Image: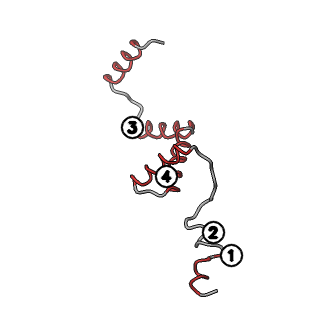
Amino acid sequence: MDVAAARRLGPAGRLGSTPHGGYTEGMKTAVSIPDDLFEQAERLARRVGSTRSGLYSRAVREYLARHAPDEVTAAMDCVCDAVGEAPDGFTVAAARETLERSDW
């Protein structure tokens, strides 16, 4: 094996430069998705200048964030703490009026 080939192999004789044998750090996995979804994802990745892995990572991260109610609540609590708890009269009146108009 020549020097250039040895450099390409990386740790433990695997391709790539990371311990997982790939070009980027992180877990490699295989998933099956419908062809039309794959094509849409490919087009979006090209349009936003992302790799397929980058696009899928961001999509899963966003999905997880949307489905983590405790984290959302904690973030909202932090915002409320930063803003303060004393609402002004206008906000109280507007909220009351909005609730009175809503069907429960």
**Residue 83's disc number:** 3
90 vs 66, nearest the viewer: 66
65 vs 28, nearest the viewer: 28
Task: Give how far apart the Cα atoms at labels 4 and 1 are.
Answer: 29 Å
Judged from the image, the secondary structure of the residue bearing numbered disc 2 is loop
**76, above or below 87, in the image:** below
Farthest residue, direction front: 35
Structural crowding at the residue carrying mark 2, measured as other residues with C-alpha within 10 Å and reported as few (<14), some (14–19) or many (≥20):
some
**98, above or below 57, in the image:** above
Q: Tag 3: residue type? A: Val
Structural crowding at the residue carrying mark 4, measured as other residues with C-alpha within 10 Å and reported as few (<14), some (14–19) or many (≥20):
some
Badge 3 or badge 4: first in the primary sequence: 4
Task: Give how far apart the Cα atoms at labels 3 and 2 are.
Answer: 47 Å
Q: Tag 2: residue type? A: Gly
Residue at the disc numbered 2: 21
Task: Give how far apart the Cα atoms at labels 2 and 4 are.
Answer: 20 Å
Q: Tag 4: residue type? A: Leu
